[in-house]
Amino acid sequence: MTSKESQSAFVLDERLSQDCHLLADLPFCRLLLMNNALLPWLILVPNSDKTELHELTEAQQLALMKEINLVSRFAQQHFTPDKLNVAAIGNIVRQMHIHIVARKTDDICWPGVVWGVKQKTAYGQVQLERIAESLKTFLPPDTHFHPLKRKA
């Protein structure tokens, strides 16, 4: 099965779909952007039915770590954070997903956690296009990018 065939069978949790912009398909994960321009927050969702990291095969773990590192480097370069937070917490959304949050000391919830933050500002189309264009120059050329759809 090719990467494109396996990604086409991919079913994204409805809550992630509602809260995020679908950006791209990497070889093992789907890349999302949380729709809150106040906090640069990327999410990787592995193409797996497993809910825990240790349940992945060693090859899947390595693929996931490679993609976490790639997206983390992108976030570091594009958003220039003071601190990068990477976490796999899925108490509400059980589908395995990895949060990569570019934190700044002057962000809306520094130094506290970003979970459950009430303040939100949706990304504008121009902001989304800038992030997507930056991603296109950063990610491998065979990456499948999704059309951007503005959310309210």
Image: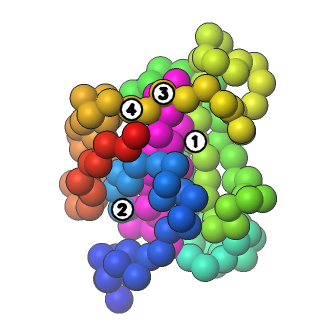
Apparent side of residue 125 relative to residue 83 in the rendered image (left or right): left
Identify the residue under disc 3: 121
Q: How dense is the environment of label 4, judged by Cα within 10 Å: few (below 14), some, or many (20 and up)?
A: some
Q: Which mark is residue 123?
A: 4
Mark nearer the N terminus (2 vs 4): 2
Identify the residue under disc 1: 100
For the residues marked 1 and 4, what is the alpha-carbon distance in whole angstroms? 17 Å
Image position of 151 with respect to 78: above or below = below
Image position of 89 with respect to 82: above or below = below
The question of residue 131 being in magenta is answered with no
Q: Which residues are magenta?
A: 26-47
Image position of 106 with respect to 94: above or below = above
- The location of residue 104, given as percent across then percent down, is 60, 17
Query: Which corner quadrant of the image does residue 135 belong to?
Result: top left
Apparent side of residue 24 relative to residue 116 in the rendered image (left or right): left
The question of residue 31 being in magenta is answered with yes
